[in-house]
Amino acid sequence: MTSGKPSLGIADWLSLGAAPVFALMTLLTLIAGDHHIGALCSQGGAPSALTGMAPMYLLMALFHLAPWLRLRTAAGR
């Protein structure tokens, strides 16, 4: 008899870890600032809110939300 909860393996735990880690990296980058990194990555143009490491980490966190959504839908069944 199963409890209805999905069983998670090591790969599942690793995939679930990506989104929170990238979200934390976003917050730390926003708090600490990425001015020195932004200078290396910019093309000399005007700074934009969409450039820098924080938006990249945020996008990476969003792209890695799929395992969380699958877990959520599996738990709701």
Image (spheres, rainbow, N blue to C red):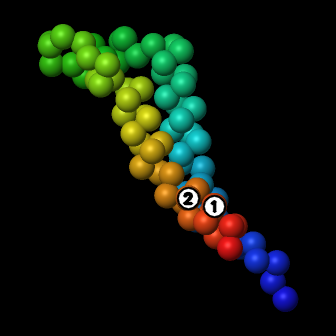
Contact (CB < 8 A) between labels 1 and 2? yes
User: Which residue is at the front of the view, 74 or 64?
Assistant: 74
- Quadrant (top left/top right/bottom left/bottom right) for the C terminus: bottom right
Is 67 positioned to the left or the right of 63 in the image? right
Count the numbered circles shown.
2
Residue located beneath label 1 in the image: 72
Residue at (68%, 67%) from the top-left corner?
Answer: 76
User: Which residue is at the front of the view, 17 or 4?
Assistant: 4
For residue 9, which quarter of the picture?
bottom right
Q: Position of residue 28 (x, y in %)?
A: 55, 22
Q: Amino acid at mark 2?
A: Leu
Residue 56's place in the image compared with 51, above or below, is below
- Quadrant (top left/top right/bottom left/bottom right) for the N terminus: bottom right
Is 45 positioned to the left or the right of 77 in the image? left
Few, some or many residues within 10 Å of mark 2 (<14, 14–19, 20+): few
Q: Is residue 68 visible?
A: yes
Residue at (25%, 22%) from the top-left corner?
Answer: 41
As drawn, the label of residue 69 is: 2
Residue 50's place in the image compared with 19, above or below, is above
SS category of the residue bearing label 1: helix
Q: Position of residue 16 (x, y in %)?
A: 59, 55
SS category of the residue bearing label 2: helix
